[in-house]
Amino acid sequence: MTTHLVWLRNDLRITDNKALSAACSDPQAKVLAVFIATPAQWRQHHMAPRQAAFIHANLLQVQAALAARGIELICHQGDDFAGSINWLVEFCQRQQVTALFYNRQYEINERQRDARLEQALTGQVSCHSFDDSLLLPPGSVQTGNGEMYKVYTPFRKAFLQRLTESDVSSLPAPRPRGEAVGFTAAAAFDYPLVEVGEGYPAGEEAALHRLRAFCREQVQDYATQRDFARHCRHQQSVTPIWAIGVISPRQSVNRPAR
């Protein structure tokens, strides 16, 4: 039996997750998922404790949703990106993983980490990465001369044209792969503990509810009201869910279009 491993990062959802969907496309494969917390790296990147708490809250939701579909999500806490590479290589060997699936991150440290991991897995595990956290791949909107745009208005026009030519439909959550499985709930991160607050409920349904409210009440006035504190509070209520991928950009762009 082949074993597919999904590495979740800033895509904490089961609906419209390209890596997860691809890993589940083979009905005969065993599918596992992992999430690696890297508190030392987060400190270097100045992650807010509230964001770490929000990640943890949503991670528990994803664990339960995947377990109900027969997919175990293993949560590991290391220190930094270098340690996560070593742990993943050993995990793939222990679990006899044949293919790794993940959604790309574009920050420099994250790209370097992924390149080193793929190099370490060469000849052992096939790696499949996807552009999932953006509507269009980075660098794909260029001028007729193949250069990057330097003025916003023509960039916006070209972006919207590319968007109309692209498939931005949302993928469904994976089907159950057998009986539900048990799981060990993710332990609290080694990070300053704070309360997320009632204004930030975890889970995809809560995130979609917040997106619907934003589209219903705020989108039409965004251009004129975005600099005012009242509007910014509503805007902030959807920003955290995008930051960690509780809903996808495709879900977000499809919602106002309905």
Image (cartoon, rainbow, N blue to C red):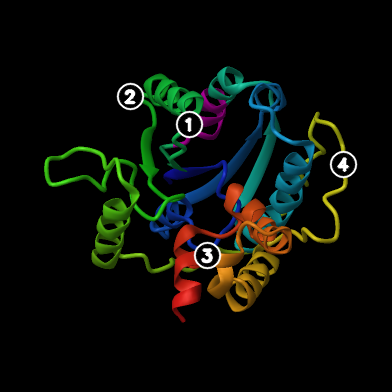
Q: Which residue is mark 4?
A: 194
User: Looking at the image, which residue is at 15% across and 40% down?
Assistant: 146
Quadrant housing residue 34 = top right
- For discs 2 and 3, the disc positioned in front in the rendered view: 3
Q: Decide: marks 2, 4 in contact (CB < 8 A)?
A: no
Compared across the picture, whether 84 is left or right of 136 comes to right
Q: Earlier in the sequence, mark 3 or mark 4?
A: 4
Say what amino acid the circle numbered 3 marks: Ala
Q: Which residue is mark 2?
A: 123
Q: Position of residue 213 (x, y in %)?
A: 65, 74
Q: Earlier in the sequence, mark 2 or mark 4?
A: 2
Say what amino acid the circle numbered 4 marks: Val
Q: Earlier in the sequence, mark 2 or mark 1?
A: 1
Q: Secondary structure at mark 1?
A: loop
User: Looking at the image, which residue is at 35% across and 23% down?
Assistant: 122
Q: Classify 109 as above or below 62.
A: above
- What secondary structure characterizes most of the magenta part? helix
